[in-house]
Amino acid sequence: MGRGARARTSPAPALWRRPGGSARDGRRPPSSPSPAAAPAPVLVPRRRARREGRSRQEAAMQDPGPERGGSAHPAEEGRGSAAGEASWLRRVFEEAQGSSQLSVVPAEPPPVTVVAVERYLGEGPPRAAPQYWYDLTLADGKCQERCHLAPRLSGLVQRGHLRAGTRLRLTRGSYLYAEKRLNCGFLCLEELEPEPVGAAEPPDVPTCHHRQPLRGERQHYLPLWNNEDPYGDMWVAEKAQARVDIDISKLTSLGQLEMTWRSNVHFHPLLVRVLHKSRLRYYGRPEKKVDMPYQAYFEVADGSGMMSMVLWNSLCPEWYNSIKVGTVLLLEEYAIKASYPFKTQPTPGDSQMKRFATIEISLNVRNPPTKISIIPEEIVKPEWGLPEVKYRFITRSELDDLPNNHSCDVIGLVTFVGRAERTRKREHGEDFWLYRWAHAVDGTSDQPFILEIFATSQPDVFKLIHPMTYLVCTQMRVMRDVTENPSSTIYLTTSNESQIFITGWHKGQPYTKDTKVKNFIQWTKTQNEANQMKKTVIGGYYPFPRPPSNFLKYCKNNKVETVLKAIAEMGKEIEALHYRERKRIAVQGIISAIRYIRCSNAAEEASGVELVEKDTPQSLESSAKSKEDHVHKGRNTNLQNEEVMSVLGPHYTPGEEHQHQAALSKKNSAKRKMSCRLNTDAEQGGASVIPVSSCSYFTRSARRKLRLEEFQHEDFVQDKNGQAVSDSLQCCTDGERMSDTLETEETGRVCDSWESDLWAQVKDKLMKYLHHSTIFPESIPRKFDYVHKDLLMQQYNLHEAVHQPKETGTRENINEFKSASGFGYYEVTVLGINHDVAVDVAFLPLLCTEDPHLFQLEDFQNDTLLSCMSGISACQQKSTSSGRLHDMFPLSNETVKAAMDLDSKHVICILDICHLGDDKVEVFLSKIYETVEPDVMDPV
């Protein structure tokens, strides 16, 4: 790993590490709001654990005893035991339950598999911020047992260390009785140890069934990463439709209800059609004891107008999935209440329809108990007067003329879909919004729709969005800053009433009758599949929306001092991140050094651009040779319509071979330094790369020891005989000799760097030096490969709650897939304004050679340096012929000049940070503001 601790940005908690490590290394700072911040007990050494637990363990093994009586579900959880063989997990349960301390320290614990990780709301005092607990289902090959994860270890799940499919050893546990239940108890996991890299594959285990959570009085589990999605067996997939005789004379209308609801207690039946459907709202609180605290809004209509209908509590799991847009409902028991004034309102497709906004229909299990019937569409009669669902579809060519916050529906062919990410709902809270970005084209413009898609309570659709599918998004809102360039910043975002549909979900939807949808289908029939596949990209860092043109707009109405973070505090910001949490922060500093790192084709795809750490079981394995590219056969297949809309079959693969980029000319320039070139033999096997240190920064003495002041890299590389080889890769100034070439099994990279005079003077005197410039495999947008779409979607989706064993033949490494932009990246050193701290961050120029519109490379207003660095890829692309570079130097003269213009100047850097799981956190430079700009007041 280059420059020591660059890959280790978020250490694992102390109770989740290999034996021999320091328990202090992984603790969270006391100031952290996370429940994982509580002081953790020292990890019990294996030898002591064996001494303490041997006597009890031997006794348990000699006399297993009867079926344990304290289990919440002894019959279910002990299922699967082989005849004549005892389950180790069950013995641990019995030993803990029989101990006077109700605890157990197993001797020689075998590895067990985490089958499921399930989340639910914890209990707490009134008005406390919601905190969540986790139950784990473990399997030892003979049975499954559900266990409770000690709340102080919740950070293991929240930061992606502990997930379904993980292999671990239980080193300490305790037995807890449920004091409000009879004969009920469970094992609490107190200390865990991960199974080392190279452990055997997890054994086959039966499917996990979702039951009531172990601890507290909650009745259901929540989805693992957000609260808006249905999760568990209690959510009914499809309710049966009713065959009922409808007497129109006994019905009432929405208009009549508005006039008479105050004087009536019981209401006549209603016959309505659903026009809009909201995402689920979970309103659970630690002090509340509602069994199913869910709520969902629907907009329903009859011939008199439209009104809101609210589905409450336990009716949501029963009916939410079955009530769709277009569904006809017969409501025979319901309540009428005054409408909640602050809820969102969808934009109806029919602008002439009357809206009854003062009251709403309330459906609950009591007061009165609601009776709902779904009427089949084939028996709906015209004389009932039910309105049809109407939409507001637009084309991409029409989008540029629409105002901010305009509501519309879109359909397009997906060309890009980003990884799933999360953003915190409230500062220091544990609730997150789940979202992803996507691009879709409809043939009316060269520009795609840019779509910000939040989870819409359709998890099966959300996680299956992939390139080459037909995507429909309804009730989208136009987002544009009227003070900026409208055509460059416009995008669409989902609203509370948005619904998304992909291929496989279109059949029977009301929008299939829309004229613009039919026009889109006709356009797809004229398109060549192979040509469209060349433009498809999936995953990676996506720098959108761009920060505004000046810092005051970035601050919006917040005070500058509340927005700016100190560089020295970045470590706390990063440690507080949860898995796939995306955050944007602003720091003051001085641009002091720039290094352009261009990886060769094999290096980029084998090791993820940078030599990524390999000492954690979750790290992706490296391969020195890129997987042979799949090539289209050039068939003239058009995009066809199957069941209204269909997507391409799985027999296609990306159609272009990756062109190797080479031949970089050597040009000298002021203050430019050429670092060494690490040459490798691409035909050798993959190498394991171990980082020098797991610290997130170096002190001054540590930096001197590693000679980082000369931007040296010290990597440990395993040779063929398993011996560790260490070499310092020394940088050389212009006119100085290049350092000796180190032959390894990794393919090499070429670095070109510039540094300021100030940096040369202070770099040896820093009190703290943070290294966050690593580019991880998950950071890189990849060319989409339809044959391996499941692997690619799994890589860029979130970890599943329940383990899904891999199928044979699907063990391809993500690094083997081609990058969408193979030009390298920049490492930028930002020096603190007090010259005592510094941080390395990354800047990733993005350009898809087949589709220049993909990443919206727009001018960086008032940002000459990033504009030059972003333009490198474009310049290189223009200068290529047959995929090769000609007379192009990685760090251009324009970039060096722009950097020199900022020499010693105070600037504000906008950084995008994202936690990728385990110890991997990416930090990208997104924008630079100069403090001498008119809109940025320099505090003096």
Image (cartoon, grey):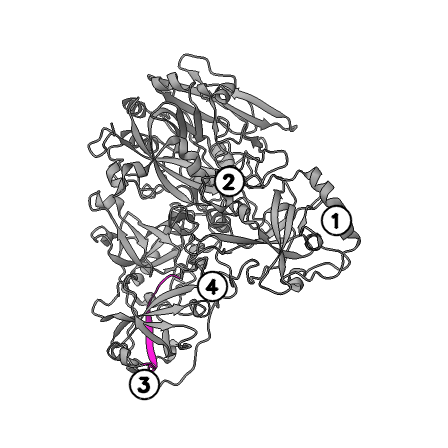
Q: State the extent of the magenta-drawn residues as a range.
A: 265-280
Residue 271 x %, y %:
33, 78
Residue 700 x %, y %:
47, 21
**Could you tell me which residue is drawn at 57 percent across and 59 percent down?**
214
Q: Which mark is residue 56?
A: 1
Q: Amino acid at mark 3?
A: Ile
Q: Is residue 193 left or right of residue 371?
A: right
Where 887 falls versus 237 (above or below)?
above
**Mark 4 or 3: the one toward you:** 4
Q: Which mark is residue 248?
A: 3
Q: Which residue is mark 4?
A: 289
Residue 56 x %, y %:
75, 49
- Earlier in the chain: of badge 4 and badge 2, it is 4
Q: Nearer the viewer, residue 504 or 323?
A: 323
Circle 4 crowding by C-alpha within 10 Å: few under 14, some 14–19, many from 20: few
Quadrant housing the C terminus: top left
Q: Which mark is residue 816?
A: 2
- Earlier in the chain: of badge 2 and badge 3, it is 3
User: Mark 3 and mark 4 in contact (Cβ < 8 Å)?
Assistant: no
Q: Amino acid at mark 2?
A: Glu
Q: Amino acid at mark 1?
A: Arg
Secondary structure found at label 1: helix
Q: Is residue 900 left or right of residue 14?
A: left
Q: CA distance from mark 4 to mark 2?
A: 50 Å
